[in-house]
């Protein structure tokens, strides 16, 4: 990846709403070059989506999140793909990851209440043929999400003038 | 009754000869103001990367609180030797050619004292860091000033150096990338300087504390030029590259004779650099590259923002290729750099440092540090624009 592309991606990663004009100013590229680069990055799927990180707790919306560990059995000819596709089609499933170690898959599931999440797991996930075992961990508090710290931090002050 | 004491008569003459730091005045002015945006800060706005702080905390938990070797921890010196070998292809012996100090400030002081006899001339290239001239004077040396020029992009030229050298010249202090101009010197520029230095048989103290902060091409280490290793006292530190200003950690690299001379002063004054900071420095060298590069890329974006913005306002600003300072000219506003800075502070609450603080050569310029958040830079540019429009 060339240096300018990295600059453009870092700008958008930091602020998905940053205008192309602003990116042009910050990178020294022309507006046209930025627009072309961004379109290209979108087309190639390098930019997947423009997203907002929201502190739902602070917004007063009591969503419940759980991390579900799944132990699954694999059949000889098919890998994880068919099962994973079934899982990620549920809108309640926010993320699906294949892991190394004791468990095979990790899901993040969201719902309005703990009961709703628990029933979803019991009815829709545990009952799948390949799923041998599930462990549900409810998220009690999120401190950091997608690289963003979700609570007020101490402000470190510098002297106003130094040589 | 005993005779009254007049403390002022005990103060050494040299203290009265050194002019007070021009920066101090702006510090006092800025300290009393609210809602101030400061572009007057010569340190990163980042907090030291967590992995470095964490390594220091761990060392304290383990009880690593002792003195170290006067030269500094051997592990740190070995890391430094590897770092220079890999980055600049220059080999220093960690046992005899590296001295770990408390900041480049101490390294500078010790380097000058180690080579200066009373009356020796030390050439200082300005605009530059405010400590160079006083450090030469404290050591009993005579500072000889070279003023670099905007038309040369504030690079030092061989002709300027040639003209400043006399029979008494002992050394020259250079600092590229430069504080306050942001100027850099490429290999060819430095080769021309090296020729003159060799011909007149003088030493070079090269303060390269901003070496990691170069944009559009890498840094050339002066000591890596042919024949310059023995002639150079290379100074560098962790403050700027790794956002570790408060750790006060730096180092000097030079030939064994020079390093042992510097060590003699260092051992009787500083003894050793703080062990916690040295441990942080080891961690920075081992694992800090990625985070450092991320910060440098962020500075680079802010650099574009501020240089662009200042030029749009009508303050002519050449492109700084290193450090984190923009150095626009305020000449076409009709104000002196001091008046501009002071009025800007009072009327728009933006702190900048007049270039004249860094030597005569900085007259008519303003140092604007972009080691501050993008939002603050944008706000500062708005306010500077409003100020200039109102003139």
Image: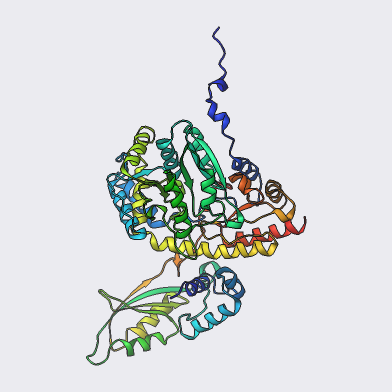
Q: Residue furthest right?
A: B390
Can you see residue A156?
no
Question: Height in image: A29 above or below B197?
Answer: below
Q: Is residue B321 left or right of residue A106?
A: right
Residue B43's place in the image compared with A137, above or below, is: above
Q: Residue at x 34, y 41 (%)?
A: B259
Front-lying residue, A3 or B186: B186
Q: Position of residue B173 (x, y in %)?
A: 48, 45
Q: Quadrant of residue B287?
A: bottom left
Q: Position of residue B27 (x, y in %)?
A: 61, 43
Q: Give how far across and how far down residue B89 sits, in percent.
A: 33, 59
Using residue B343 as the reference point, say whether residue B327 is left or right of it. Answer: left
Residue situated furthest bottom in the rendering: A77
Q: How many marks?
A: 0
Q: Residue B5 sits in which quadrant?
A: top right
Image height of A78 relative to B172, above or below: below
Q: Quadrant of the N terminus of chain B?
A: top right
């Amino acid at each position: 990846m060339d240096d300018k592309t990295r600059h453009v991606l870092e700008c958008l990663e930091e602020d998905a709403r940053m205008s192309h004009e602003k990116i042009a100013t910050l990178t020294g590229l022309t507006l046209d070059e930025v627009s072309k680069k961004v379109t290209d990055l979108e087309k190639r799927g390098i930019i997947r989506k423009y997203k907002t990180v929201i502190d739902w707790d602070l917004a007063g919306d009591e969503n419940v999140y759980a991390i579900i560990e799944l132990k699954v059995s694999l059949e000889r000819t098919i890998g994880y793909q068919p099962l994973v596709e079934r899982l990620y089609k549920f809108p309640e499933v926010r993320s699906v990851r294949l892991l190394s170690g004791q468990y095979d898959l990790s899901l993040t599931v969201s719902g309005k209440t703990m009961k709703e999440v628990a029933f979803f797991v019991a009815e829709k996930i545990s009952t799948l043929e390949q799923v041998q075992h599930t462990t549900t961990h409810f998220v009690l508090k999120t401190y950091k999400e997608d690289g963003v710290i979700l609570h007020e931090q101490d402000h470190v002050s510098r002297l106003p003038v130094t040589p | 009754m005993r005779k009254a004491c007049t403390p002022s008569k005990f103060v050494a003459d040299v203290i009265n000869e050194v002019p007070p730091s021009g920066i101090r005045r702006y510090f006092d002015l800025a300290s009393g103001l609210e809602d101030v945006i400061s572009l007057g800060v010569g340190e990163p706005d980042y907090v030291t990367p967590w992995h470095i702080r964490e390594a220091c905390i761990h060392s304290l938990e383990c009880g690593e609180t002792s003195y170290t070797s006067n030269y500094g921890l051997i592990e740190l010196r070995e890391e430094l030797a590897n770092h220079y070998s890999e980055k600049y292809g220059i080999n220093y012996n960690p046992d005899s050619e590296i001295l770990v100090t408390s900041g480049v400030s101490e390294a500078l002081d010790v380097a000058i004292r180690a080579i200066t006899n009373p009356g020796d001339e030390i050439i200082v290239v300005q605009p530059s860091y405010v400590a160079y001239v006083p450090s030469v004077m404290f050591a009993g040396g005579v500072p000889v000033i070279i003023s670099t020029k905007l038309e040369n992009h504030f690079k030092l030229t061989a002709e300027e150096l040639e003209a400043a050298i006399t029979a008494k010249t002992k050394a020259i202090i250079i600092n590229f990338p430069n504080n306050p101009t942001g100027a850099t010197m490429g290999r060819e520029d430095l080769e021309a300087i090296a020729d003159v230095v060799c011909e007149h048989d003088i030493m070079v103290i090269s303060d390269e504390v901003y070496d990691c902060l170069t944009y559009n091409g890498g840094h050339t280490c002066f000591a890596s030029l042919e024949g310059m290793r023995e002639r150079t006292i290379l100074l560098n530190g962790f403050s700027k590259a790794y956002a570790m200003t408060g750790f006060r950690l730096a180092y000097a690299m030079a030939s064994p004779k020079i390093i042992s001379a510097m060590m003699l002063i260092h051992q009787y004054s500083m003894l050793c650099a703080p062990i916690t900071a040295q441990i942080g420095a080891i961690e920075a060298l081992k694992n800090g590259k990625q985070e450092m590069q991320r910060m440098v890329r962020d500075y680079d974006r802010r650099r574009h923002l501020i240089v662009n913005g200042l030029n749009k306002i009508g303050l002519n600003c050449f492109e700084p290729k290193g450090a984190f300072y923009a150095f626009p000219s305020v000449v076409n506003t009709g104000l002196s750099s001091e008046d501009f800075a002071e009025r800007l502070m009072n009327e728009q609450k933006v702190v900048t440092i007049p270039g004249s603080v860094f030597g005569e050569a900085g007259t008519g310029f303003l140092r604007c540090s972009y080691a501050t958040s993008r939002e603050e830079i944008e706000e500062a540019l708005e306010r500077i624009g409003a100020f200039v429009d109102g003139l």
